[in-house]
Amino acid sequence: MDTVTCSRCKQTVNSQAITCPFCRTQLKAYGHPGIPLYRARGDEFLCDTCTYHADDTCNYPKRPHAKECTLYQNLEERNLELQRQNQNKSVSVSVNNWIKRNQGLLLIFALLFICFLLSL
């Protein structure tokens, strides 16, 4: 059983629970148990750190003063994920470019390796 921590009372609850059994805080979007409900902490608004607010694609009626949202996506986490993806792509692109530039050398090494195996 997967568990999560309630944002209000900090009790451990089942990750599929729609409301916290201890304090009755809504944990998931009403009627949609698979959709998490994000909540702002303190006096902050979710929109201040949301990707959709930053790129002006949010159509949530409570924008820019939303305290709860099901579509929230943290801008900093998304930027970190994009950086990781770009780093992974740049390494694979570099390897692919090196292979393309050195196909002849790789072919010679492959032929030498095959000759070595045949001579054994």
Image (cartoon, helix red, strand yellow):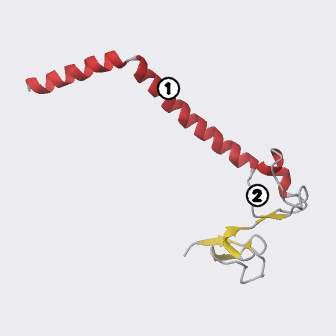
Q: Mark 1 or mark 2: which comes first in sequence?
A: 2
Q: Is 65 in front, or is 21? A: 65
Q: Is residue 61 above or below residue 83?
A: below
What is the number of the mark on residue 94? Answer: 1
Identity of the residue drawn at 82% across and 53% down: 58
Query: In the visual, does 59 lie left or right of 36?
Result: right
Whether the residues at callouts 1 and 2 have beta carbons within 8 Å, the answer is: no
For the residue labelled by badge 2, is the local secondary structure a helix, a strand or a loop? loop
Give the residue type that dot 2 points to.
Tyr
Measured from the top left, where is residue 99 in percent x and y? 40, 23
Above/below status of 1 relative to 118: below
- Say which residue appears at 84% left-offset and 56% top-offset: 59
| Pointer 2 local density, CA inside 10 Å: few below 14, some 14–19, many at least 20 | many
Q: Whole-percent x and y of residue 108?
A: 26, 17
> Circle 1 — which element?
helix
Residue position for label 2: 72
